[in-house]
Amino acid sequence: MESESNKQRNSRIPNFFRLDVKERIAKLAEHGFIEASDELSLDAGTHTLRQHIADKMIENVAGVFGLPLGIAVNFLINGKDYVVPLVVEEPSVVAGLSGAARTARINGGFAVACSAPIITGQVQVVYIDDVELAREKLLERREEILNLANTLHPKMVARGGGAKDIEVHVYNTGRPKGAMLVLHLHVDTRDAMGANVVNGMCEGIASLIESITGGTVFLRILSNLTDRSIVWAEVTMPTDDLGIPGFPGKAVRDGIVLANELARVDPYRATTHNKGIMNGIDAVAVATGNDYRALEAAAHAYAARDGRYRGLTDWEVNEEGDLVGRLEIPIKVGTVGGSLETNPTVRICHRMLGNPTAIELAGIMGCVGLAQNFAAIRALATAGIQQNHMTLHARSVATSAQVPADIFEHVVDSLVENGTIKVWKAKEIAKEMRSNEPQQQSIQPRSSAFGKTIFLGEHAVVYGRPALAVPLPVAVEATIVDDDVSTLIVPRWGVEQRIPSQEDRPPGLLGMLCALLDRLNLSENTMRVEIFPNVPKAMGLGGSAAIAVAVIKALSEHYGLQLSLEQINELAYECERAAHGSPSGVDNTLATYGKPLLFQRDQKTKEASFQELTVGTPIHVLIGLSGKESLTAMMVAQVRDGREQNMAEYERVFDAIGKLTDSGARAFQQGDIQKLGTLMNLCQGYLNGLQLSTPDIEELVHIARMHGALGAKLTGSGGGGSIVAIFEDSPDSAIDAIKDAGYDAFSFLLQ
């Protein structure tokens, strides 16, 4: 398998799935998989098929239909790195492939071999007096037939392709003069898709066939059963690499073998088994402009080649105890002609793969099919495929039920928690939420925690100054359910992951959860942790602290730990330290106690103190969401680095923010909203000077002030995230203006 590109690439891109779309595109460019022009095109969305081009491709065009373009990373095939473009709408395919490729990569990746890119053309001959004699004559004049076919496409012959062989088959239909003869013309089409070449050759030799046989040529057409273009893909996975939490490697290995054995003997299972293989292959075919329908037809026909429909893969245990998977499948594709010349996205996908030859592309597809099969039957052999699809399926069902956007996430949460993920159930839940009828209680009791917004004192609070913070109502809920396997589910964020052991040191939310379970001596318990956030993540609203507090409360409630609020707060602070490096402690304190606070941490003793505040008059609070994630650890580190380089200047800024905060706390309690707003506006100036604001934040602040905000500023760590603004009256007009500008916002009454 050779390609035009010799550039060294590395398809191992850790945490690729955690990046946003723009960052993923940048990573592909950084790793050498796309050119600078492709990066610009993908980022701007100008790579899609244009309507006037589509109008030249098929008849009666009325528009252009879009599908997601995903990227499977980690593929190592015959020692070469690939990222694989996939056009597919089915959830879990891309993630499953990337995970399977990661497991395969540990032991050297996939090995693949391919036969020549042969397509078979058929010439049907009827009304023959002696079919056996006609068959012999055709075989005798084989060279003459091949030479004639090749004169029709000399350029194909010059590239090493062309007609290579013939076969002759005799069929008897049982009707008078029903015997017929079918000549198979085997044509190597090189990198071309080849349909026109083969059909043209069949047309061109028809007269010669008639003169040799004395019969009448009827059909002259290629066959999509490309059983001369075979791909053999193989992968070996050591048993130790197969284990997942709750399932040791040997159990996973043996489960995969057993599941595969059913597909080898039962056509009902084999059909679904092979459909899973084609989930991967079809997605690559669409991305590369190939005919997935032809590939489907060939694969399923080949699966029944011995007279019984069977699974196309074979999984077994070798002498060393490793799992070995093999796939033998017909794949004939092209890399020149067809939609490759008309669809810009197809061209980008070919470049992403390194401009492979047709044989190389067929091999890639074979490995993708084997990887997808592994991912699917591993899921079946362990906790079951339904769990992995649960959240995504719930979102799809809610969409099908036309659930309105403002209650969409609540309906998804309820579907997952209820377990009945059906369209009728989604409609019932939505109707109940829209009506005045009392909603059903949660199936499991939920523990809750508050979010936070900082009116005054961001970043200065890390260095011993006070911060004025108020809670966001019920930001996160969590519940614990006993289960056979420990799993974390966050339906709203599409998270469904098994909880590993603390020894694996998982990052992010899983890491926090593992540390908590270890600290509370619950690591040996198996449970399902369900988290229901009501605030967006990484928006400066204390979401991570609220998650920690809600989960700690839920664990305490479920296992009867009887943790005090002080203990919960201390545990949550440890979680925040692990996540953000040097947190102030404001977020976890607000999440735990849910009261307006003046918070301060002593720089020497590190002891935290907080004074509960009472608001002097009701305040309408608006939260504006920029949509750009604010990474707290990064922004805290940025301020820390700046302070180390300019200690005196930063300390003066922190002192000024501290004085604003003290004055703001007095105004807050006295009900002097005008003064509080002025102090917030001044604080925004200091935060901007610390390079914590962004153009989006500044625009949100401006919109809020133009629509009546007494004060508006960023809230949280900055660098994106959110703003907070205060109003004497309803901020509805400001919310509408913010949404018109392409952002989002919500409000609540603080009293």
Image: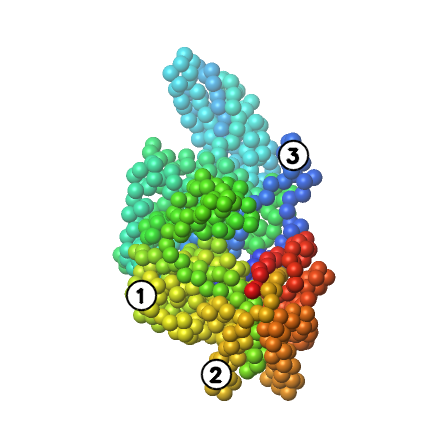
Query: Does residue 353 appear left or right of residue 41 in this picture?
Result: left
The residue that mark 2 highlights is: 606
Q: Counting other residues with Cα less than 10 Å from the Cα at mark 1, is it few (<14), some (14-19), or many (20 or more)?
A: few
The residue that mark 1 highlights is: 560
Closer-to-camera residue (332/27): 27
Query: Does residue 342 appear left or right of residue 212 in this picture?
Result: right
How many marks the image carries: the answer is 3
The image shows residue 457 at horizontal and vertical percentages of 59, 76
Q: Is residue 135 visible?
A: yes
The residue positioned 31% from the left and 64% from the top of the image is: 559
The image shows residue 408 at horizontal and vertical percentages of 52, 49
- Residue type at numbered disc 1: Gly
The residue positioned 39% from the left and 48% from the top of the image is: 418
Q: Counting other residues with Cα less than 10 Å from the Cα at mark 3, is it few (<14), some (14-19), or many (20 or more)?
A: few
Q: Counting other residues with Cα less than 10 Å from the Cα at mark 2, is it few (<14), some (14-19), or many (20 or more)?
A: few
CA–CA distance between discs 1 and 2?
A: 30 Å
Frontmost of labels 1 and 2 is 1
Tag of residue 620: none
Frontmost of labels 3 and 1 is 1
- Residue type at numbered disc 3: Val
The residue that mark 3 highlights is: 61
- Residue type at numbered disc 2: Lys
Disc nearer the start of the sequence (3/1): 3
